[in-house]
Image: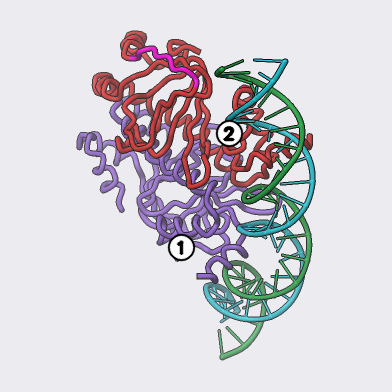
Chain colours: A purple, B red, C green, D cyan
Amino acid sequence: MTLHHYLTTFTFLPPDITSVLKEAFVKKDFPKGSILIQPGKTAKELYFIEKGLLRGYYETENKEITYWFGYEGHISTSYYSFLSQTPALETIECIENLEVQAIQRVDLYRLYDQYPILHRLGKEITEHYYLQLEERFIHQHFKEAAERYALFSKRHPKVMQRAPLGTIASYLGITAETLSRIRAKK
Amino acid sequence: MTLHHYLTTFTFLPPDITSVLKEAFVKKDFPKGSILIQPGKTAKELYFIEKGLLRGYYETENKEITYWFGYEGHISTSYYSFLSQTPALETIECIENLEVQAIQRVDLYRLYDQYPILHRLGKEITEHYYLQLEERFIHQHFKEAAERYALFSKRHPKVMQRAPLGTIASYLGITAETLSRIRAKK
DNA sequence: ATACGATTTTGACATATATCAAAGGAGAAT
DNA sequence: ATTCTCCTTTGATATATGTCAAAATCGTAT
């Protein structure tokens, strides 16, 4: 999905504002393994993913905790860092070669000021991600591992094939061993 | 915290728009035990809590799952239902006598259209709740029960004293028995 | 094709938390 | 005050999932 296509799904945006917004984005490519966001650094850019797979993870004493996947049609950054302009706590890494459209935070906020209707865009996008997170939260917390896996494969079938098992397990809040056993059962 | 005080924390809002917005809210009182949102019904109102304690919960086969507490200074509704205008899945119930400022969805959206800067208000509020949920999600998922309890008592000390143990346990994703044992340990 | 490192699978055992059950306590209504 | 109901505590046991370890498989570079 291209940025253009994504933006046109927001029908309230006048075409001229859509154009101005699009021009503020710059296409960037990253090879597999690249790090887009680093802990300790403050996120200055926001990405729209046109192609490829990303993950966000936290590093703890003994393991990495993947808490998020992003792919075609999604927006990616450390929301916490980007919004609060304080150092990120997590890493965002390319699982595959990546093609994104990137916008600088300063440019985005300048556009917000110039075109107040863009706040509506930001609001609706944030609302969407909020609801997604809420659904995931409820599920994650109150269903068993096998059910969570089933929902995940329904919601993100492509990630299933493209992300390593250990990473998916971590996203589901279980160990790689447990996920391997869940897969074996069926 | 009054609605007026809350709104003035958003410094970008011109006083006249703040006034108009405030006038769209109506004060309402609910006795303890009242139900603000019912599963199957679509949320038409959004509340700002001036006094009292609320909880949101899901009903499953054999138990109630509390996933949210709201109190002074918070906004409350079924976000999912309010935003998508489809029937709510959860119940929102007063744990204490409640004083809120209520706004009708139609009125709010009329104001959004009239004053685009209000989208910024909506955006910033949603961003705030998104970040809170994200923090909670990470914690909930990757920390042990006792640690989750510790964070909860730090974040919401007042709820600790005001909500029944079983409800807090459910919020933390554990049983009442387990929470009782965690408390006994310390 | 071969070899190396990384990922996945499988097994044995450990542990946090759930479940079931019963006994205490606290608050509300009579 | 007394009863009744609901909430909390405590105990015994069950279970899902974690941990540790080793074997099997896969992918990439040589």
Question: Where the C terminus of chain B falls, by quadrant?
Answer: top right
Mark 1, residues whose alpha carbon is within 10 Å: few (<14), some, or many (≥20)?
some
Q: Mark 1 vs mark 2: give the one in front.
A: 2
The picture quadrant where one finds residue B79 is top left
Write down the residue under mark 2. B167
Percent x, y of residue A59:
63, 49
**Measured along the vertical axis of the image, is residue B105 above or below residue A72?**
above
Identify which residue, B41 or A65, lies in the foreground. B41
**Label 1, label 2: how far apart the Cα atoms are:** 35 Å
Marks 1/2 same chain: no
Percent x, y of residue A80:
52, 36
Q: Is residue B173 left or right of residue A43?
A: right
The question of residue A91 being in magenta is answered with no
Q: Residue flagged by tag 1: what amino acid is it? A: Met
Which SS does the magenta portion mostly show?
strand
**Measured along the vertical axis of the image, is residue B13 above or below residue A27?**
above
Instruction: Determine which of the numbered discs, if any, sits on residue A160 in the image.
Output: 1
Instruction: Determine which of the numbered discs, if any, sits on residue A70 in the image.
Output: none
Residue A107 showing in the rendered view: no
The question of residue B26 being in magenta is answered with yes
Identify which residue, B43 or D1, lies in the foreground. D1
Percent x, y of residue B30:
44, 17
Q: Which residues are magenta?
A: B25-32
- Indicate the secondary structure of the residue bearing disc 1: helix
Residue at 27% x, 46% y is A4
Task: Name the subunit of mark 1.
Answer: A
**Measured along the vertical axis of the image, is residue B2 above or below residue B124?**
above
Task: Name the subunit of mark 2.
Answer: B
Percent x, y of residue C21:
68, 48
Residue at 38% x, 48% y is A74
The picture quadrant where one finds residue A135 is top left
Residue at 48% x, 15% y is B50
